[in-house]
Image (spheres, helix red, strand yellow):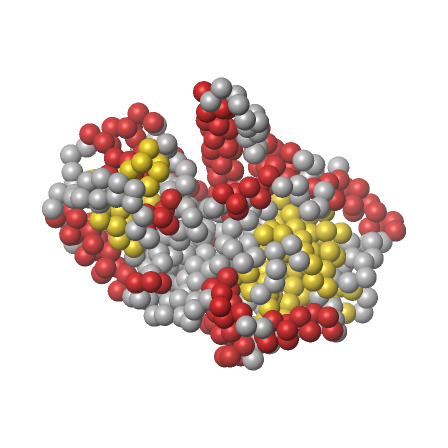
């Protein structure tokens, strides 16, 4: 009903006018989660991403804060991709009054369907655990809140998903156009191009989304970005380099061979969407080449199993490499010895499986899910290996283990870390510093301003400097909660850029180190 009334209003009285194109930075600013941006256009408010904060408790508490804008006042919501740090607050957003479409690539719609339901299940489980703990404690503190959102809320959000294929231009209003461009990060990931006609000029604002590393055997490389006036660009790995694919694969083989060869078990915390599928592809290649000792592999994540089914539904996103594999009769996500464990009972049976074996389980940062039980069962065994192949957010359990903390607290228990702990750089679905710079260099004309976001401060400031040094770009690391008038002749914004360039920001980051430097090694 809300969308119909909007169209009728535009047809009868024309779009509402605003004095300027304004951008509100509501998340993923000087950190890597909680992605959310709101654009004020002449025809209404457009939100790009509605993501969940993850990691440190101080960040996760932000998920409970009131929304800066009433959900009922947002006219459009666009998702760059399905990862929960970009989509995970949409159920709460819908529950609190958002009534319009949630626009995303078709593959993102299918992935969000299962991921939002899974996230709601986690929210409900966490709330039930907090309630039980409160009752055991004699109810001496304030009653814990209920879940952040429920399965019913997630289902309501899923019902509002509306698919938009890549490169299809849609007129959201007479003066607002939208296009999604393949970002090459995960299945269905998109760079979002927004064009706004303001009087006799058109302003273009582009959100990079998460930019893929390229050379993925599964999905296509990122498309070149369009000419744009203003760019909001991620910087997750803006201060470091990844191992190249061949070196990464060889290191992966060597690490697995070492542990499997001594009859040890390998536990790999893996993001359910993207990372698990890439690991299955890599294990399939190694198994076909007989490059590893005999082993059994378990995918112990219902979400990852469901996501793999979604991958099979969207060959339009596949790279030429995987399409050729499929044409030759090979299933890139299956091989002899692979077991998918769907139920809790099947998951428990893994503990009784004879070694050696490999377990892929979620969550990738070890902050939830079945991976915590596998860590309890294997961290204290010096014959086993915990292998990190994904980004570990600040203060997450995964980050603590990777950085050498022992003991660590898991599900109320203190667990000593005696297993070997390794990390492989290069499986990341994010572009590294050089990949980000190549993506920026492909823009036909430099933007009037680039806002560097979606990175911890060290990475964002380092990448801002790289843009300035290599391209002479006008770049700014904005502040969380800030609002910027994006008029090209905005002198206040120009002054803000100049002031940040002159400030001593370098205390917040260190220069980039080549991959292999232990202090910067990041999966």
Q: Position of residue 461 (x, y in %)?
A: 51, 67
The residue at the point 56 percent across, 80 percent down is 472
Q: Position of residue 111 (x, y in %)?
A: 48, 42
Q: Quadrant of residue 61?
A: top right
User: In what quadrant of the picture does the C terminus appear?
Assistant: bottom left
The residue at the point 51 percent across, 50 percent down is 33
Against 52, is 198 above or below?
A: below
The residue at the point 33 percent across, 53 percent down is 403
- Residue toward you, 467 or 416: 416
User: In what quadrant of the picture does the N terminus appear?
Assistant: top right
Against 131, is 71 above or below?
A: below
Against 204, is 283 above or below?
A: above
Q: Position of residue 434 (x, y in %)?
A: 42, 71
The residue positioned farthest toward the front in the image shown:
140
The residue at the point 25 percent across, 28 percent down is 349
Q: Position of residue 507 (x, y in %)?
A: 49, 68
**Is 257 on the left or on the right of 343, as rendered?**
left
- Residue toward you, 234 or 13: 234
- Residue toward you, 62 or 473: 62
- Residue toward you, 476 or 413: 413
**Is 217 on the left or on the right of 252, as rendered?**
right
* Residue 461 visible from this viewpoint: yes
**Is 285 on the left or on the right of 315, as rendered?**
left
């Amino acid at each position: 009903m809300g969308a119909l009334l909007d169209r009728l209003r535009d047809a009868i009285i024309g779009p509402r006018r605003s004095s300027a194109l304004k951008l509100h930075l509501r998340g993923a600013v000087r950190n890597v989660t909680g992605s959310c941006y709101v654009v004020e256009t002449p025809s209404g408010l457009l939100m790009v991403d509605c993501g969940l904060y993850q990691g440190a408790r101080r960040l996760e508490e932000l998920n409970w804060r009131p929304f800066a804008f009433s959900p009922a006042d947002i006219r459009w919501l666009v998702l760059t991709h399905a990862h929960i740090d970009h989509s995970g607050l949409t159920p709460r957003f819908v529950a609190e009054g958002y009534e319009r479409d949630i626009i995303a690539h078709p593959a993102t719609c299918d992935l969000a369907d299962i991921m939002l339901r899974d996230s709601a299940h986690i929210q409900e489980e966490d709330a039930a655990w907090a309630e039980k703990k409160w009752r055991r404690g004699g109810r001496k503190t304030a009653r814990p809140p209920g879940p952040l959102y429920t399965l019913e809320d997630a289902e309501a959000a899923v019902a509002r998903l509306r698919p938009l294929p890549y490169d299809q231009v849609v007129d959201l209003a007479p003066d607002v156009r939208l296009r999604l461009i393949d970002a090459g990060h995960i299945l269905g990931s998109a760079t979002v191009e927004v064009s706004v006609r303001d009087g006799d000029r058109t302003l273009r604002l582009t959100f990079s989304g998460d930019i893929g590393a390229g050379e993925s055997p599964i999905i296509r490389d990122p498309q070149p970005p369009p000419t744009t006036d203003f760019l909001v660009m991620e910087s997750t790995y803006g201060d470091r380099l990844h191992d190249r694919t061949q070196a990464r694969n060889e290191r992966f083989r060597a690490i697995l061979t070492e542990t499997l060869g001594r009859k040890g078990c390998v536990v790999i915390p893996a993001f359910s969407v993207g990372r698990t599928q890439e690991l299955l592809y890599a294990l399939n290649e190694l198994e076909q080449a007989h490059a590893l000792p005999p082993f059994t592999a378990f995918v112990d994540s219902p979400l990852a199993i469901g996501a793999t089914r979604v991958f099979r539904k969207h060959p339009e996103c596949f790279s030429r490499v995987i399409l050729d594999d499929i044409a030759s009769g090979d299933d890139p996500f299956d091989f002899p010895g692979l077991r998918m464990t769907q139920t809790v009972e099947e998951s428990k049976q893994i503990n009784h499986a004879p070694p050696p074996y490999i377990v892929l389980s979620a969550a990738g940062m070890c902050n939830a899910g079945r991976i915590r039980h596998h860590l309890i069962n294997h961290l204290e065994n010096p014959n086993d290996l915990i292998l990190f192949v994904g980004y570990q957010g600040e203060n997450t359990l995964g980050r603590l283990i990777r950085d050498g903390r022992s003991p660590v607290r898991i599900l109320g228990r203190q667990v000593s870390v005696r297993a070997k702990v390794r990390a492989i750089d290069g499986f990341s679905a994010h572009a590294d510093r050089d990949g980000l710079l190549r993506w920026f260099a492909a823009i036909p004309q430099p933007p009037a301003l680039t806002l560097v976001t979606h990175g911890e401060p060290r990475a964002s400031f380092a990448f801002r400097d790289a843009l300035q040094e290599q391209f002479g770009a006008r770049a700014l690391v904005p502040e969380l909660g800030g609002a910027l008038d994006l008029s090209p002749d905005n002198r206040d914004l120009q002054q803000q850029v100049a002031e940040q360039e002159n400030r001593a920001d370098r205390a917040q980051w260190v220069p980039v180190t080549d991959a292999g430097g232990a202090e910067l090694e990041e999966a």
